[in-house]
Amino acid sequence: MKLNCRLNQLTEAEYWHLLANYCRYTDFNSLGLFRSLLENGKLSLVQRQQLRDAAIAVFPKFYEFLQLKDPTTYLQLSSLGQELTVADERAAWEEIKHAQQRILTRKQLGHRNFGTYSRHNCPYDTCPYNGLMIRQNSRLAEGVLRFHSDRRIGWGHYNHQTARRHQQRKAWAQGREQHDE
Ligand SMILES: [Zn+2]
């Protein structure tokens, strides 16, 4: 049996039915379910929160794995209805990084099914994604690029080079000052 509809257009009642009967649908996938809770325009905040909690109860392991697979969706779901300050968001990313590390260590043997992840190594110290494992071509990867372009920094290496050039210029200028004295 197929769902034959987009998850993000389900009503609340249809979600409850789906959570109880997802096994019957051959095209069901839990990632789509979790994402749809954010995208569905028919749900109120309270309904979203209740369905999120119910979905976590049905798929606890997948929800944990979401921190690696799609950390943005995980963060948005886990903070539904909360106003995160910059500090809160930073702390949440830190927790996600620890969780990613735990998941990776545990899954090391099944590593091949994982897809390609790379650790974001940012010269910009305050970048909240620094140290985060990010899957290539994911929505988060695009989000990081946007975040960086807002602040006029590149993916990494470009900025390392500018920093080094800046230091060299400064050292050169300081050296000259010493000679001038
Ligand atoms: Zn960064």
Image: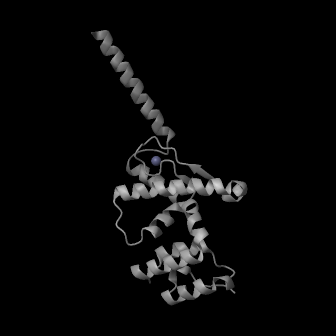
Q: Is residue 87 above or below residue 29?
A: above
Residue 18 visible in the shown view: yes
Q: Is residue 96 above or below residue 153?
A: below
Is residue 41 toward the left or the right of residue 30 in the image?
A: left
Q: Residue at 47% x, 33% y: name it.
A: 161
Residue 2: image x %, image y %? 67, 85
Which quadrant would the C terminus be assigned to in this image?
Answer: top left
Q: Nearer the viewer, residue 179 or 110?
A: 110
Residue 136 visible in the shown view: no
Residue 138: image x %, image y %? 56, 59
Q: Residue at 40% x, 79% y: name it.
A: 45
Residue 1: image x %, image y %? 69, 87
Q: Quadrant of residue 79?
A: bottom left
Q: Residue at 46% x, 68% y: name it.
A: 78
Is residue 150 toward the left or the right of residue 9 in the image?
A: left
Colouring method of the image: one colour
Q: Residue at 46% x, 53% y: name it.
A: 94
Is residue 62 toward the left or the right of residue 94 in the image?
A: right
Residue 92: image x %, image y %? 44, 58
Is residue 89 toward the left or the right of residue 72 in the image?
A: left
